[in-house]
Image (cartoon, rainbow, N blue to C red):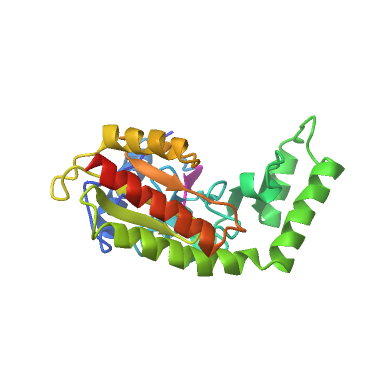
Amino acid sequence: MHPVTAPNTYRGPFRGADSAPEYVRSIDQVLVTLAEQQRQVAGFICEPVYGNAGGISLPAGYLQQVYQKIRAAGGVCIADEVQVGYGRLGHYFWGFEEQGVVPDIISMAKGMGNGHPLGAVITRHEIAEALEAEGYFFSSSGGSPVSCRIGMAVLDVMEEERLWDNARLVGDHFKARLQALADKHPLVGAVHGMGFYLGMELVRDRQTLEPATEETAQLCERLRELGIFMQPTGDHLNILKIKPPMCTTRQSVDFFVDNVSKVLHELE
């Protein structure tokens, strides 16, 4: 396992939308080391949108450059879509689409079962056949007809109720309302993400980006008293990870944002 520098265009070592080349250098360093050691690259796995960072997108062109390098070295490219995939982003069904790439393997779960424990892997035929040649995969509950029927029902409802469109339309309204909070509340440093995968990052200083960890905890506690359950996330626990149901309405969004604004006023 060889961790590389995770791109964070807001508070990472390299910032801004054009920071991809700087982060790709971390990949280059690992590939050079492996080549010197005469070791084979197995693959590269990455969330196309960083879920626990509040939905931060990768800098433009990052995965295109990385996937090209990994494949040239003989590895496969894996997209972790467990949290951010399945239409939740609104503008994209899969997170990797924003980067203009197609991975070799996609892992998914969570939303595809709508609460039922369900996960799956998508890959190309030649990769699946190569894995099969090494032996069979066994899972006590794998391939359950009940779980598969639930998964199909989720897709049917998403199509019939146009939930993907709802994530885009209502999600855009959601993000706009959250971004407007930054004009009124100094604690709001940034709003990340899109659709129904959003993150509001709280900071004490917008220049130093000092995390407002304690204030975020206080905000979540007060929201609970108002009937809204939220949990801090991120390395500094200063981000509200906002993942409402795909059927969320504008009325529910306004209720949420109005109460967040109310509590921020109380904290300031």
Q: Nearer the viewer, residue 110 or 246?
A: 246
Q: Nearer the viewer, residue 98 or 70?
A: 98
State which quarter of the image contains the N terminus. Answer: top left
- Residue 136 falls within the magenta-colored stretch: no
Q: Residue at x 79, y 33 (%)?
A: 141
**Residue 156 place in picture, x, y as percent:** 76, 62
Q: Residue at x 23, y 60 (%)?
A: 183
Q: Nearer the viewer, residue 75 or 169?
A: 169
Residue 130 vs residue 229: left or right?
right
Residue 34 vs residue 43: left or right?
left
- Vertical position of residue 39 compared to residue 65: above or below: above
**Residue 93 place in picture, x, y as percent:** 57, 63
**Residue at far left of view:** 207
Residue 229 vs residue 65: left or right?
right
Q: Quadrant of residue 59?
A: bottom left
Q: Nearer the viewer, residue 15 or 90?
A: 90
- Vertical position of residue 55 compared to residue 267: above or below: below
- Vertical position of residue 195 compared to residue 31: above or below: below
**Residue 110 place in picture, x, y as percent:** 63, 44
Q: Residue at x 34, y 55 (%)?
A: 191
Q: Main secondary structure of the magenta part?
A: strand
* Residue 151 in sight from this viewpoint: yes
- Magenta residues, as a range? 42-47
* Residue 27 in sight from this viewpoint: no
- Residue 46 falls within the magenta-colored stretch: yes
State which quarter of the image contains the C terminus. Answer: top left
